[in-house]
Image (tube, rainbow, N blue to C red):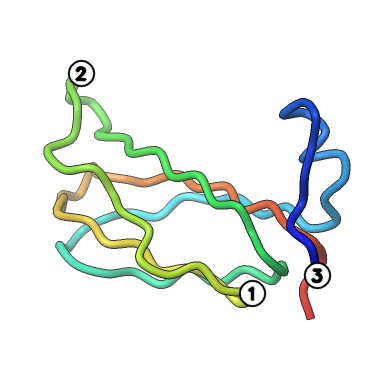
Amino acid sequence: MAPLRAEEPRDLIRRASAAHGGGEQLSQIGASRIGVTADSPVVLLTPYWDGQGEAVGFIETLERVKHDGFRLVSGNAAENDYVSWVAVGRKGR
């Protein structure tokens, strides 16, 4: 299946048939697996350090993206450390 293509960013959401989003608390350093169901998903991660008013120490990294989910790796860990995510792709298997 060909990857999604769009002339404008908003077209990507409109043409996709599967969009997922969520947030995860990062209470320990290391890898986390997030389950989604979409073929060839495009994933966006954004860190959030609640109540700190400053940037996180490390940027979260996507390690693997597959049709059944993705794995993110973080060097951040705190009770108030989160990562928000959005995964957009074609409807999964």
Specify few, some or many for label 2: CA neighbours under 10 Å numbering under 14, 14-19, or 20 or more. few
Specify few, some or many for label 1: CA neighbours under 10 Å numbering under 14, 14-19, or 20 or more. some
User: Where is mark 3, residue-wise?
Assistant: 1
Residue 23 vertical position relative to residue 34 in the rendered view, above or below: above
Q: Secondary structure at mark 2?
A: loop
Residue drawn at (83%, 33%) of the image: 11
Query: Which label lies toward us, 3 or 2?
Result: 3
Q: Position of residue 78 (x, y in %)?
A: 15, 49
Q: Amino acid at mark 3?
A: Met
Cβ–Cβ below 8 Å for labels 1 and 2?
no
Q: Quadrant of residue 57?
A: top left
Q: Which of the two discs, 3 and 2, labels the residue nearer the N terminus?
A: 3
Q: Nearer the viewer, residue 23 or 46?
A: 46
Quick one: which residue is furthest to the top in this view?
53
Question: Residue 89 bears which disc, if any?
Answer: none
Q: Position of residue 56 (x, y in %)?
A: 18, 34
Q: Amino acid at mark 1?
A: His
User: Where is mark 2, residue-wise?
Assistant: 53
Residue 6 vertical position relative to residue 86 in the rendered view, above or below: above
Residue drawn at (77%, 39%) of the image: 12
Left/right of residue 66 with respect to residue 49 in the rendered view: right
Question: Residue 67 bears which disc, if any?
Answer: 1
